[in-house]
Amino acid sequence: MITRDKLTELAALVGVSQVGVTTAEPLYYMQDRLRRRINEGRITPFEEKNPTRRLSPDHLLAQCRSIITLAIPYASVNPLLPGSAEGLRGVVARCARSIDYHHFVGYKAENIVSLIKKNVQSTFNYRILCDRSPLVERELAFNAGLGRIGENCTLINTQYGSYTALGTILLDVEITADNPIDQACNNCGKCRNACPTGAITEPFVINPYRCLSYLTQAAGIFPRELRPQLGKQIYGCDHCQEACPDNLAAECSPFPELAYPLFPAEPLLIPLLTITQREFDLTIGLTSAGWRGKTTLQRNAVIALGNSGDRSAVPSLARLLENDSRPLIRLHAAWALGRIGEANAYFALEKSQKKDPDPAVREEADLALKNCN
């Protein structure tokens, strides 16, 4: 099989500088930590529920012996374009502004595997995973020397900070493993203090049901008590990462593919409310936010309009409340109108309270009317 140095050389040929190797030994030392998450109700529907399946790669690749880990930087400078239209704007997390990083990381991993095949005599089996893997990818990347774990549970790379997407290549052959870097988180607490909802309950412990990054992706009704804290976020949240001192000097991604703003950093909110499916598929649908579909993102945009407090949003929100076929959108439109609290908002809410066919929407309208008063 190839040497560790050769792997670095091959990865560089496809533009990947952050590559490491760890063993396939089960991470049994993490079992208690995972069980604590389960016992405290901090497991989301997006995660593997069985701790054993998160700690060992054997069920993913028989006789796995080595794991190559990649850290692909995605942060880029995405300013508003000159002459951009004025209007109420939201905020999109850096990881969701360009092409879907899942596909990009997988593409780079396939490139590396292809080069390995050309440089070895023997055959081998492999499997590529990115983000949707049941394995604890950040811990694997830490063990492979790609960075340290921050108090906000992100992997902090020395060159690109925490703005990286992780991927793994499972192999049934052995490559010399790297060592973790001998550097710990600064424990400054700035990420914890920056979290609008207090989701980082203690160092290295996150309650996902208070984390805006999770909540902007979760379908259904957004928790009422956390809607004001959402601010202008419509997908993901970078607050804790932006507060991290190690990200101040983080380099931007060298990949031009990850710089094209399919989902702008600060998109206009009102047009997002009426985006067509075709428009969505050709823009946001190509990003890592696309999997969630229009409704959840429009729900978030409605909340952001409410948080803006701007009366110019009232006509659009009132139209949604009266005409949108989706109870979820009408419910949040009612909340947003109550948050703004303008006279026309009051009239729209009063009508909804009396006539909306959905009892949850009528209840939300009633609460919003009391807020207007």
Image (cartoon, helix red, strand yellow):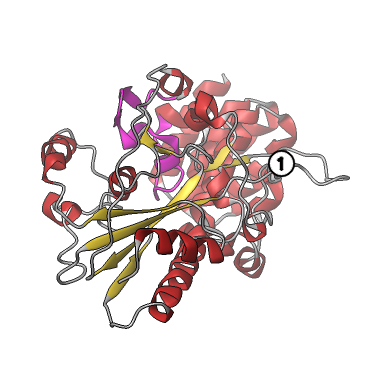
Q: Given the current orientation, which residue lies at the most extreme right position?
A: 83
* Picture coordinates of residue 236, whole percent (x, y): 50, 42
* Picture coordinates of residue 373, whole percent (x, y): 56, 18
355 or 65: which is nearer to us? 65
Residue at the image position 35 percent from the left and 78 percent from the top: 120
Q: Is residue 292 left or right of residue 24?
A: right
* Picture coordinates of residue 293, whole percent (x, y): 50, 60
- SS state under label 1: helix
Residue at mark 1 = 315
Residue at the image position 57 percent from the left and 63 percent from the top: 285
Name above or below for residue 333 compared with residue 115: above
80 inside magenta stretch: no
Disc 1 residue type (three-letter): Pro
Badge 1 local density, few (<14 within 10 Å), some, or many (20+)?
some
* Picture coordinates of residue 211, whole percent (x, y): 39, 34
Name above or below for residue 95 compared with residue 287: above
Q: Quadrant of the N terminus?
A: bottom left
What's drawn in magenta, residue-wise? 197-224
224 or 37: which is nearer to us? 37
